[in-house]
Amino acid sequence: MRFVVFGGWFGSGNLGDDAILIGLRRVLERVFPRVEIVTLSTDPAHTRRVCGVGAKRLMSARGLFRRGDDSLSAYLQAFMDADACVVSGGTPIYDYGHLSRGFHFGLPKITKTSLICFGVGVKSIESMMGASSVRMLLQGARLVSTRDALSRDELVRLGVGGRISVTGDSGLFLEPAEREDALRLLTESGVDTSRPMTAICPRFLSTQHRRHYHDPLSSVEVSRIRRGVAGVADHLLHMGFEVVFLPFHRGSVDDDLAEIRAIVSLMHRSDPKIVKRDLLPGETMSVLGCMKLVFGLRLHSLIFAASLGIPVVGVNYDSKIRGFMDLAGARECLCEVYGEPRSWVEVVDTVLDDGGVMGRVISRSCGGMRARVLDEAGRMRDLLKAGY
């Protein structure tokens, strides 16, 4: 069975998007005897090396039509050769970028290739153009599932018809590297692994939310979040934990190291550790598995830790964070942007003091999400087989 996959920030070096693609590959390999995947990626070599799938360079509609060569026909061929087109990734549906989305969602229709939306995230769609285009583009989808209930509810509100399943994030199928590898990587970063460790995984934040693919934030909110994270880091250091800052994206647009530097500059203490080397998704997951707590603004820091039963605390700055924590049964582990920094510390203390109860709750919830993802993959298999 051959699939063409698009929708994530594949090739960007984002650990979460790489994990989604690795997880999707493993899901498809479970339900189909032979699988061939070609992913549209901004860096095909990276995607082939890290995710273990075929890759073709992602191009814009404008770029393809301006080239004046056979690039468009070659692009179409990737869809024509596929048995199905799977839209996955983090959040492929949002209220801008309508031309690119319309072009890529339209290609399966042109090539008569089955369109599957598999565990997608959906941002709030407020514009008339966005609402009408999403309804139109998803009309031809043979299956639609979302990774959280908020995304499903938004599609229903927009008038998208048919069954919409709530499953989970394909990154839940990532497997960790060996623990010894994680401890070695931590030691190389100056972490004393004999002490209890906690991880903080910030996310580059900006008032230019469209450029950085997060919900709108004012400069006041960005500052409040950074000060809140700095306060949590200071508190954990005071409690005797090793505090490890772990970036999930190192690109020129979203540089988590820049965010980490901004947070560290606000701290009263100056001895947190920062993992600066590039890690593979499985290595990152294994590092988080060594922690007593993960405080994350990156969604997949929460997903990696939760799937291993590590207690997590998130910040309610974006619908995808809220969506996952709701589905995991861990809404009380969210810090509110407009809460006082002291209240963030209280959330952290409550989770640390519960004897691992919340870690077990979210681990069971992640098991349920994985089961629903596999069920949806089985429906995809049955549907595609029935089409022959």
Image: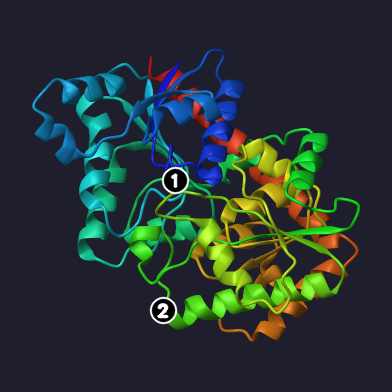
Residue under pointer 2 = 218
> Where residue 255 appears, x then y in whole percent?
48, 55
Q: Which mark is residue 230?
A: none
Q: Residues within 10 Å of mark 2 (few under 14, many from 20)?
A: few
User: To which residue does mark 1 refer?
Assistant: 163
Q: Residue at x 49, y 23 (%)?
A: 53
Circle 1: element type: loop
Q: Please tell me whether residue 51 is drawn above or below residue 160 in the rendered image.
A: above
Residue visible at 38% across and 14% down? 388
Q: What amino acid is labelled 2 in the image?
A: Ser
Disc with the residue nearer the chain's start (2 vs 1): 1
As drawn, is 297 to the left or to the right of 53? right
Residue at 38 percent across and 72 percent down: it is: 207
**Mark 1: amino acid:** Arg
- Rounded to the nearest angstrom, the CA distance separating label 2 from label 1 is 36 Å
SS assignment at label 2: loop
Q: Nearer the viewer, residue 151 or 346?
A: 346
The residue depicted at 21 percent of the width and 64 percent of the height is 128
